[in-house]
Image: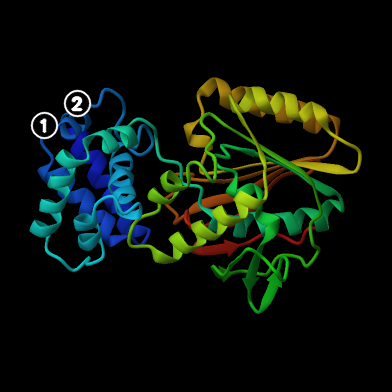
Amino acid sequence: MSAAHRTAMRQQADACDRLGSPFTARLLRLLADRLDGETAVGARVLGWPGDPLTTGDAVALRLAGGLHALVLSGADEALARVYANPGLGDEQLWQAIACMLNTHDAHLQHWLDTPPQTNEPARSAVLIAAGHWLTARFGLELELLELGASAGLNLRWDAFALEVQGQRFGPADAALTLRPDWTGPPPPATAPRIAGRAGVDLNPLDPARDRLRILSYVWADQGARLARMRAALDLAAKMPVEIAQGDAAEWLEQRLDLRRPGVLQLVYHTVVWQYLSPETDSRARAAMARAGAAGPLARLGMEQDHSGQPGAAIWLDLWPGGRVDLGRADFHGRWVDWQAPAPG
């Protein structure tokens, strides 16, 4: 294994540890230490021609997802037993994985073909709070426009509820109730009204057809995340949303021209912007600046900012109004440090 591939898997293992998945961290460290080129899957991973890092092709998470899918689908009972007993030693875990590399080559090759898509519905805690804040600020209906929407689970955040500091934000019969560790003031009580919703992705997933793939990218030892994902996918099957396939900037240029009176267009993205090409980045920023000059517009970002602080930065760009820092949040929605100013 090249130094770059070892580094990629170990860096991802460190991230799994930080994000509460010690089993996946151990799995990836075993792969980093022991994977060789004697199987077709091993040879492909070791000879990967692109960028193996998580910020590139995320090869480690592709392979981890493929293995988890074998467990979720019931395709391999032996591997499922090992996954159900995380206290087993490294030798037993590795022997089970090594066997899978041979037995399920076609399946694992298929999972290596495409990058993982997180679809983390717990990020909707930030979207719910921001939706309430924007409604209190502008008093307008919201049109939701998500970049990097994947299966669109976070385009349905108004059907979820947020419970923080003894208060509930969202419907009483919510499909999913989010309870992150919350610091800072609660969001305003002004309930948002949604006028429409749509998203774009280079490779949109279908919540029904791609259910196994979406679930497989949730780390195997995180039962609460799996339960949230299943609830969000169940809702998505009953609540269709338009997800276009295409370039984010080109799509945004077209959608921002379709504004309606009395509606605030909310463009948002969660852990997506780092994957955009420089051209798409530039075109998307220019499209929002043009649209904002013609009327009210909001952009919500939840993104890694390499500041050395935990989690992702959360902010709003408002036209009119400029940049508003909202605080920080865990990448998987476990906690939110909400530092938004009063919306007035």
Q: Residue at x 21, y 28 (%)?
A: 44
Q: Position of residue 284 (x, y in %)?
A: 64, 27
Q: Where does label 2 land, which residue?
A: 47
Q: Please state the horizontal and vertical placement of residue 111, each as a whole percent of the image.
A: 33, 37
Q: In this orientation, which residue lies closer to the viewer: 320 or 5? A: 5
Specify the label residue 37 is tagged with. 1
Query: Between disc 1 and disc 2, whose residue precedes?
Result: 1
Quadrant of the image occupied by residue 92: bottom left
- Judge left or right: residue 160 versus residue 204: right
Question: Residue at position x 18%, y 69% from top?
Answer: 87
* Quarter location, residue 164: bottom right
Give the foreground label among 1 and 2.
1
Q: Amino acid at mark 2?
A: Gly
Q: Quadrant of the C terminus?
A: bottom right
Q: Is residue 318 visible?
A: no
Say if 25 sits above or below 180 in the image. Answer: above
Q: Could you tell me which residue is drawn at 54 percent across and 67 percent down?
A: 180
In the rendered structure, the answer to whether residue 43 lies left or right of residue 209 reads left
Q: Quadrant of residue 223?
A: bottom left
